[in-house]
């Protein structure tokens, strides 16, 4: 029959007050590990050897080979727990805070320079009021003091052009002053020029009125349209004739207008 070797044993609590002899090995029955003693008297409670499964380390753990550790982590990614994956961020005028669902929040102070391409508080002020999707195509002009700003006097060195927006011919012709300054419409029957929406005092422009191939079309006007002497104009009724109404919004629901009749083109 094989011989049995049985070592002295005791709980973790009992080991805490036990000073073994130098080189003596005992068994911790609580941790199920062996304990090696150094024979240092009352200060020696032994050094417990870690089990292979679910070890608990104390003190400094030295990893001799980083490559081996990396391989072990990669091979056991499914066993890694307590890894923060739920992150959030909040910002104010001075800092950015990255928050973690189960970790420590990190605060990043506000920058004071744009050396790394980041935005300072001064940059934010400059961008206040810039419309979404606005395009900047000339960096030199934009960075020049006051260049292109609508609240300062300007000397334009290039032509400024407004589009002519086609209106939909209908019994009452709708005009949206937000869509353009200049408009055009071909009359398919007797019509009324309706009350423009989005009127803003100071807006001005022109409306080109064209007779269709039949002609003899008349145009009435909403009360917001004001004419010299209070008399509405009679349009040219010749087929394909073009009249032009020039207008300016003088006050709320008050649009001063004049008409140029039968503007000839190419004759």
Image (tube, rainbow, N blue to C red):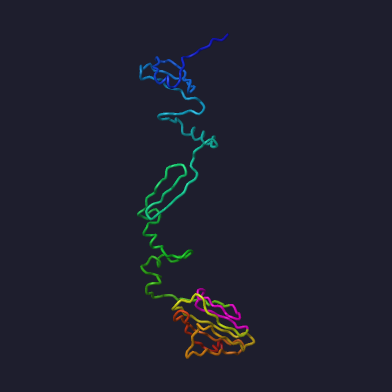
* In-front residue for pair 34/66: 34
Quarter of the rendering containing residue 250 = bottom left
Magenta part mainly helix, strand or loop?
A: loop
Furthest residue toward top:
1
Q: Position of residue 36 (x, y in %)?
A: 43, 19
Residue found at x 51% / y 90%? 231
- Position of the N terminus, as image quadrant, is top right
Quarter of the rendering containing residue 202 = bottom left
Furthest residue toward right:
214
Q: Where is residue 259 in the image (x, y as percent from the top left)?
A: 51, 87
Q: Position of residue 140 (x, y in %)?
A: 40, 66
- Location of residue 29 with respect to 116 vertically, above or below: above
Tell me which segment is drawn in magenta.
Answer: 168-188
Residue found at x 52% / y 74%? 179
Q: Does the magenta stretch include residue 183?
A: yes
Residue found at x 38% / y 52%? 95
Q: Report the label total.
A: 0
* In-front residue for pair 137/9: 9
Residue found at x 37% / y 74%? 153
- Location of residue 96 with respect to 181 vertically, above or below: above
């Amino acid at each position: 029959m094989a011989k049995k070797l049985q070592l002295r044993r005791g709980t973790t609590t009992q080991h805490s007050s036990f000073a073994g002899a130098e080189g003596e090995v005992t068994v911790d029955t609580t941790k199920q590990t062996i304990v090696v003693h150094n024979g240092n008297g009352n200060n020696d409670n032994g050094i417990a050897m870690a089990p292979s499964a679910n070890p608990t380390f104390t003190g400094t753990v030295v990893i001799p080979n980083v490559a081996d550790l990396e391989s072990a982590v990669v091979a056991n990614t499914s066993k890694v727990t307590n890894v923060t994956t739920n992150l959030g961020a909040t910002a104010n005028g001075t800092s950015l805070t990255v928050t973690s669902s189960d970790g420590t929040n990190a605060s990043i102070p506000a920058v004071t320079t744009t050396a790394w391409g980041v935005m300072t508080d001064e940059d934010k002020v400059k961008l206040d009021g810039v419309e979404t999707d606005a395009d900047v195509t000339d960096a030199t002009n934009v960075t020049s003091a006051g260049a292109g700003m609508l609240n300062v006097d300007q000397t334009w060195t290039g032509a400024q052009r407004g589009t002519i927006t086609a209106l939909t011919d209908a019994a009452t012709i709708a005009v949206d002053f937000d869509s353009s300054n200049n408009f055009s419409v071909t009359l398919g029957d007797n019509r009324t020029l309706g009350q423009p929406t989005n009127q803003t005092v100071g807006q001005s422009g022109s409306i080109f009125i064209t007779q269709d191939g039949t002609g003899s079309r008349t145009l009435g006007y909403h009360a917001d349209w004001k004419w010299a002497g209070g008399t509405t104009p009679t349009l040219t009724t010749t087929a394909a004739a073009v009249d032009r109404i020039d207008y300016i919004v003088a006050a709320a629901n008050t649009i001063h207008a004049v008409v140029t009749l039968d503007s000839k083109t190419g004759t």
